[in-house]
Image (cartoon, rainbow, N blue to C red):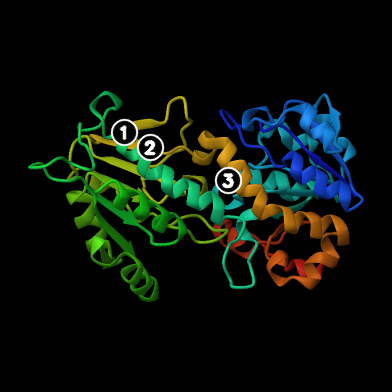
Amino acid sequence: MKVGCVKEIKKLEFRVGLTPDNVHEYVLHGHEVYIQSTAGDGSSFTDAEYKAAGATIMATAKEVWDTCDMVIKVKEPLPEEYPLMRKDQILYTYLHLAADRTLSDAVVNSGTKGVAYETIRGRDGGLPLLKPMSEVAGRLSVQEGAKTLEKPMGGMGLLLAGVPGVRRGKVTIVGGGVVGTSAAKMAIGLGADVTIIDANLARLTYLDDIFGSRVQTLYSTSAAIKRCCVESDLVIGSVLIPGAAAPKLIKKEYLKEMKPGSVIVDVAVDQGGCAETTHPTYHDDPTFVVDGVVHYCVANMPGAVSQTSTLGLTNATLSYGLKIADMGLEAAAKTDPGLMLGINSYGGKLTCKEVATSFGIEYTDPASLF
């Protein structure tokens, strides 16, 4: 198979879909690999390293899209890339279709075989290709939230750790999954007063077991979320429904009662956000203020630590990518039900149930199409 990787064009996105070591693995499996020139620069991988690993370097993204049977990316296609997608080509990347109807229509109407990292399921039912970026985003959410609380950044001027004789900052994490757990580890490490809210009692039990008295766990109700938002200095939104739009759990009306200069970091922004006031921002202008509350809503947070993020992501995506290249998408998906769930579009059909539900449009089971 001809496998390609293009340079990400999302604003201030520095990750790349393949590393030179990944290229070497595809070549060992008998595949041809094509890399757009400078695609790896943002993650400190040079064209020379890709070439030494066996890749052919191409000058433009269009050349890669036109040449390859499978294109591997990090982020969803942007409008400039919509015309480059084509029928029967495999697009292997984060898609996040439920957050953008225009993107969904473009991917489906192109006829491409869209395989979304975020909806592939592992044998244990988890999300193995979302997990590493969730871990990065969870850790970053506290790092960026702590920075945003500083007065020059628009925050109230609070140090999360406090000092002797001065209270610690209060952090509420809405959602106790991978992002929330990673955020809790960082917030605890900084010495903050941490509360985790989740609707899954089994998950709360697990979190109580691993963190003990270092966190307060609360069952998720609208009253509990509002109370904690009002009391907190930093609120981290980390709720995920795989493939679907994030539920709006942090209501706009709560903000009027929150502390001036408090901060919301909405990690769910690439799925629409779990705060009603969320809209996507970028690393060069990451925050905005609503009712005195500072919002940090960067939709590609892991891109800021691109080398770590690229290595973590490609460690997870490589095995599935090799399976697709070796067997073909159809045969690979038939042997792996979790990979079948990753197929979001196929042959002009929308094949992700959660996205179809989000937009109220027709869903087609991908297994019925091949």
Residue labelled with disc 2: 296
Looking at the image, is mark 2 or mark 3 nearer the viewer?
A: 2
Q: Position of residue 89 (x, y in %)?
A: 84, 48
Tell me whether the residue at label 2 lies in contact with that at label 1, contact meaning CB atoms closer than 8 angstroms: yes
Does dot 2 land on a helix, a strand or a loop? strand
Tell me whether the residue at label 2 lies in contact with that at label 3, contact meaning CB atoms closer than 8 angstroms: no
Dot 2 or dot 1: first in sequence order is 1
Dot 3 or dot 1: first in sequence order is 3
Query: Which quarter of the figure has residue 65?
Result: top right
Tell me whether the residue at label 3 lies in contact with that at label 1, contact meaning CB atoms closer than 8 angstroms: no
How far separated are the C-alphas under marks 2 and 3?
A: 20 Å
Q: Report if residue 349 is visible in the image.
A: no
Task: Please state, as top left, top right, bottom left or bottom right, where the C terminus lies in the image.
Answer: bottom right
Does dot 3 land on a helix, a strand or a loop? loop
Residue labelled with disc 3: 100
How far separated are the C-alphas under marks 3 and 1?
A: 28 Å
Residue 148's label in the rendered image is 1
Residue 126's label in the rendered image is none
Q: Is residue 243 above or below residue 206?
A: above
What residue is drawn where x is 40% and y is 42%? 278
